[in-house]
Image: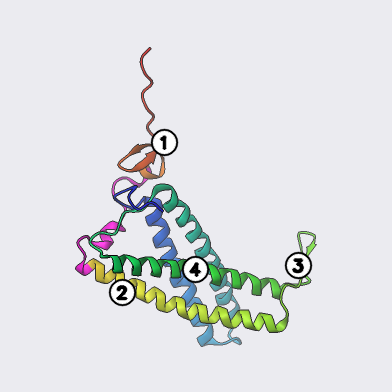
Amino acid sequence: MNQSATQCYHPLSLAGHWLAAALAVLCMLTVLLASILGRRHPAHDVLMLTHMWSGQGLFLVNLLRLLVLSTFGQPAPAGLNEDQKMGSAVLHALLYGLVGFLACSSALMLLAQAAGQQWLGMTIPLLLTGGAVMLVAQCHQLAGILLVFVTLAHIAMAYALHVKGEESVLSRMTPKGRALDYLTSQQGEDNYARIDRHPTPPLS
């Protein structure tokens, strides 16, 4: 990703960031509440289903965020030394990697439970045996716990940089200007592409 391509985040990056944060909170709260209530509670299955789909949605949003960052670039961190930049990069890599692993392991467990059932005229194959399903489930739980700690470390680092950094982190993560202009774009202006304005054709 090009960090020098822009001085501020593209609004799609900002929208993706806060949507991912909301989905992460929803995903964590639902599984926590489901574990507290227990399997016999009437809301347990609904909570676990919400947990699964919010996790898959989080994974999809992160993929779109990476696409937006690769397309529009991201600003270079302000006032950070090399160790802080490395720490930030490691935290973000862990966040993306853990979310991806959790989404894939969740999909594997779902397919294992649905093995032998018909879907769109096809029989879902048996991909994992009982022992393998238990192993994937345990790894999924451990990765989920690790994601909580990595997320807390990410929040703590962002807060520290917001308080002590040369530039407000929250200010960089807040959309500026007219969002509609940013989202309907083609011609380069203020580091964003625009489609609502086209170049004036040369006079013949």
Query: What are the residue bounds of the magenta stretch?
Result: 163-180
> Real-space Cα distance between discs 3 and 4?
27 Å
**Residue 88 located within the stretch drawn in magenta:** no
| Residue at the extreme front | 82
Distance between the alpha carbons at the discs numbered 4 and 2: 19 Å
Q: Between 40 and 8, which is closer to the camera in this rendering?
A: 8
Query: For this rendering, which residue is in front, 39 or 158?
Result: 158
Q: CA distance from mark 3 to mark 1?
A: 44 Å
Q: Is residue 127 above or below residue 42?
A: above
Q: Earlier in the sequence, mark 4 or mark 2?
A: 4
Q: Which of marks 1 and 3 precedes in the sequence? A: 3
Point out the tag, 3 or 2, that comes first from the N-terminus: 3
The x and y percentages for residue 140 are 56, 78
Q: Residue at x 27, y 62 (%)?
A: 169
Pointer 3: what residue?
A: 124
* Circle 3: element type: loop
Residue at numbered disc 2: 156
Q: Given contact means CB atoms under 8 Å apart, are the residues at marks 1 and 2 in contact?
A: no
The residue singled out by tag 1 in the image is 195
Residue 127 visible, this angle: yes
Q: Residues within 10 Å of mark 3 (few under 14, many from 20)?
A: some
Q: Count the marks: how many?
A: 4
| In magenta stretch: residue 165 | yes
| Percent coordinates x, y for residue 201 in the rendering | 38, 21
Q: Position of residue 15 (x, y in %)?
A: 40, 56
With 143 as the anchor, is 88 left or right in this view?
Answer: left
Q: Amino acid at mark 4?
A: Gly
Looking at the image, which residue is at 30% across and 42% down? 190
